Amino acid sequence: EVDAKGESSLHLLARSKKYDDTCAALFAKVLAAASEILSHCNDAGQSFLHCAAGRLNCRILAQAVSECPQLAPLFAQKDSSGQTPMSILAKHLLSRGPKPSRPAAVEVPAPDTAGEEVTLEVEDEVQGKVVRFSCRSSLLQLSQRFSQELRAQPDRQPQTLKVAPDCCRSARVLQEAFALLSGSVSDVSMDGRELWQLLSFCVQYGLPELKAWASNRLLHCIHDDANAAVLPMLLRGAKACGLSSAERRYVLYCLLTTPEALLSAGHSQNGAARQAKVLQVALAELETFTRPSRTGDVHSAPRGPCRAVDVPLEGTKLRSAYAAAEA
């Protein structure tokens, strides 16, 4: 049943000025009982998600994708004026601070050839085999994770580090990164996905100098549609990667204004569920940057525990820690 403007009960609930527990319970009942109107649009071509986005009602949007993950693609659906729920949310972000911009470029880490020779073993997804290569880097010697793994294999020579495949599966990425560190090349060419793997490697093995460069280079390329698929991963792993508040705000803005990023998260098994997780993290971040603190600072940290960030950066241990924090 719809009103004179073609709006369903979901549209009316989405426009609620006060969304308390009573309204949330009613919304849940309507979602469960009226599945046939979930994608219904009013006379302006807007789904109820457009209406909730217009009100900046992050709670109802998060509840919608949590209880009905199949709604996730509708966040990129245009209304009669060409607006999507995501683009509307992006406007709210812009209205509460300066336009997010890329951070200033950082310099390549200083050449580093100190330390003993180390052999890296990488399960290369392109070549379909384990690739081994040698390098010298004092950064690896200072890595606590690297030292722990060496102690577990005291008789193995030369020193060998088996790179965890859940953070990097590209020998070329690491070969070029350590060539950069050695000073044998002045720059490297990596796409967004390769930079993401390098960043994950740096986080897992505790290489702060190289991590700063990799994250900065990644932030400089995510605006390119060719790298849109990296945005969902970067958004969900932003805190684990140690991105600053301004950098996280820029990642959020890029995701909200790049429909291809959300669509890319759906190009896999359980695609809608993955899109829903991305949107839940995006909505949590949006609340962080649009909720004024007592001092009026819209960049203040959110109250309560952070949402889980289930990105393979430090393997099982990190994912378990975040899962425990969410629970």
Image: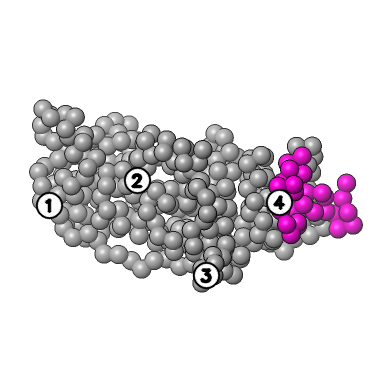
Residue located 24% across and 34% down the image = 162
- Disc 1 is placed on an element classified as loop
**Residue 82 occupies quadrant:** bottom right
The magenta-colored residue range is: 1-29
Query: Residues at badges 1 and 4 in contact (C-beta under 8 Å)?
Result: no
Which residue corresponds to mark 3?
295
Q: Is residue 4 magenta?
A: yes
Q: Nearer the viewer, residue 53 or 169?
A: 53
Residue located 27% across and 37% down the image = 163
Query: Residues at badges 3 and 4 in contact (C-beta under 8 Å)?
Result: no
Return the disc, 1 or 4, that comes first in the chain's sequence. Answer: 4
Residue located 29% across and 30% down the image = 129
Going by the numbered disc 3, the residue's amino acid type is Thr
Colour style of the rendered protein structure: one colour
Which residue corresponds to mark 4?
20
Going by the numbered disc 4, the residue's amino acid type is Asp
